[in-house]
Image: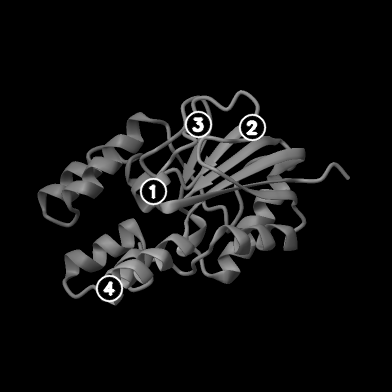
Amino acid sequence: MRVNIGCGQTPTLGWRNFDNSLSLRLAKIPFAADFLKKIGWIEQAQYEFIRFASVNNIEYGDATKGLHIKSSSVEVLYSSHMIEHLDRNGAARFLKEAFRLLQPGGLMRLTIPDIKKQVTQYNINDDADRFMELTHLCSYRPISFSQRLQLLIVGPRNHQWMYDGKSLVRLLQNFGFINAEILPAGKTNIKDYWPLDLHERESESVYVEAVKPNV
């Protein structure tokens, strides 16, 4: 079994794809998206994601709380631009769950926004405002009812922590993974990786893979 956790609008064909957005639950309720859009409680982007999820077999699941998947049954686990949305405790729970799910020798590939690239751009452009925008570490307080409802449905979109390749490798090692390494875009240790996108969000990302030990 191969799983994509936090897939959003980029599920991997032929894999089990999970996301923890409430939009996934709304996708199971007939006419819910149409009704909420009609009364102005969700925006077009959320409406389109609900419709997208309903036809692409994306499953609701929160990996920080545990997925309904048998232990040691996953060959490959992929997650792109998800772990940075978790605080440190949430990231720890996710990695423990990933370790549980993977079979011995199973491989995890994480794609994350690279704070090193963002710092490099800041040093070149000398634009602190742009740097803060790129980190997505700040969030806007919802004021109107529709904004609060949108936050409930979509969840907070800001980042809770940032990594570079080195810090993510160290984190994975701390949770028992071995052979953790930074890889360039387009490279992977996953056998028969297609249709996984090995260049996902390449301009802003770093790619790290690690293995669950056999013993």
Taking the view exactly as shown, the residue that stands out farthest to the right is 215
Marking on residue 203: 1
Q: Nearer the viewer, residue 85 or 39?
A: 85
Kind of residue at disc 1 = Ser
Mark 4 and mark 2 in contact (Cβ < 8 Å)?
Answer: no
Kind of residue at disc 4 = Asp
Marking on residue 190: 2
- Is residue 93 visible to us here? yes
Identify the residue at image location x=61%, y=23%.
192
- The mark that comes first in sequence, 3 or 4, is 4
Relative vertical location of residue 54 with respect to residue 86 in this rendering, above or below: above
- The mark that comes first in sequence, 2 or 4, is 4
From the image, state whether disc 2 or disc 4 is nearer to you.
4
Kind of residue at disc 2 = Ile
- The mark that comes first in sequence, 1 or 2, is 2
Q: Horizontally, is 74 left or right of 41 in the view?
A: right
From the image, state whether disc 3 or disc 4 is nearer to you.
4
Kind of residue at disc 3 = Leu
Relative vertical location of residue 128 with respect to residue 45 in this rendering, above or below: below
Q: Which residue is mark 3?
A: 196
- The mark that comes first in sequence, 3 or 2, is 2
Q: Which residue is mark 4?
A: 127
Query: Whole-Å distance between the Cαs marked 2 and 4?
Result: 38 Å
